[in-house]
Image (tube, rainbow, N blue to C red):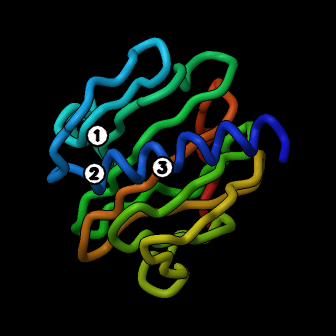
Amino acid sequence: MTGYATRYLSVAVAATLALSTSGLVRAAELNPAAIAYKLPDQIPWGPPNKLGAQTAVVVGDPSKPGFYAEFLRWTKGNHFSHPHFHPNDRFITVISGTWYLGSGNKFDPENGTVAMPAGSFVTHYGKQVHWDGAKDEDAVLLIVGEGPETATSVDEN
């Protein structure tokens, strides 16, 4: 397994555990030199943006070169990005809800999307046009990649 894949799996496992263990009782102190963690109520969610999405960066800085991991919550209510692309590949796990994906320049959330239920894994390839969002329920994603993370809009036809 490559170093990048190992880092991704480590972040994915830690993130899944953080989101699913809110009811567990801690029985031991963990060595902070060995383990860092955030419980669900400690995840630093930002406010919803104009597209209806919230982010919480948990590793690295997506605006700078290097590895990063972030949660993205598409809020319910037909909130979607419009056709765009990113410079680098991004690896995405659907943690909860249903996330909808479309590709190409034609923006059509009603007829042009494929549903990705919780547990799905998706790769957004760098420089390839896509768009995505949520319909009738929130969708929480774990996104990992190499920064800087930017989005370039494209003309819709």
SS for dot 1:
loop
Where residue 117 sits, quadrant-wise, is bottom left
Above/below status of 111 relative to 67: below
**Mark 1 and mark 2 residues within 8 Å of each other at the beta carbon:** yes
Q: In terms of depth relative to the viewer, which is nearer, 87 or 84?
A: 87
Q: CA–CA distance between discs 1 and 2?
A: 5 Å
Residue nearer the viewer, 129 or 138: 138
What residue is pinned by disc 1?
49
Q: Residues within 10 Å of mark 1 (few under 14, many from 20)?
A: few
What kind of residue is marked 1? Asn
Image side of residue 25 versus residue 46, left or right: left
Residue labelled with disc 2: 52
Q: Quadrant of the C terminus?
A: bottom right
Q: Position of residue 65 (x, y in %)?
A: 68, 18
Residue furthest to the top: 33
Earlier-in-chain disc, 1 versus 3:
1
Q: Is residue 84 above or below residue 67?
A: below
Q: Which residue is mark 3?
A: 142
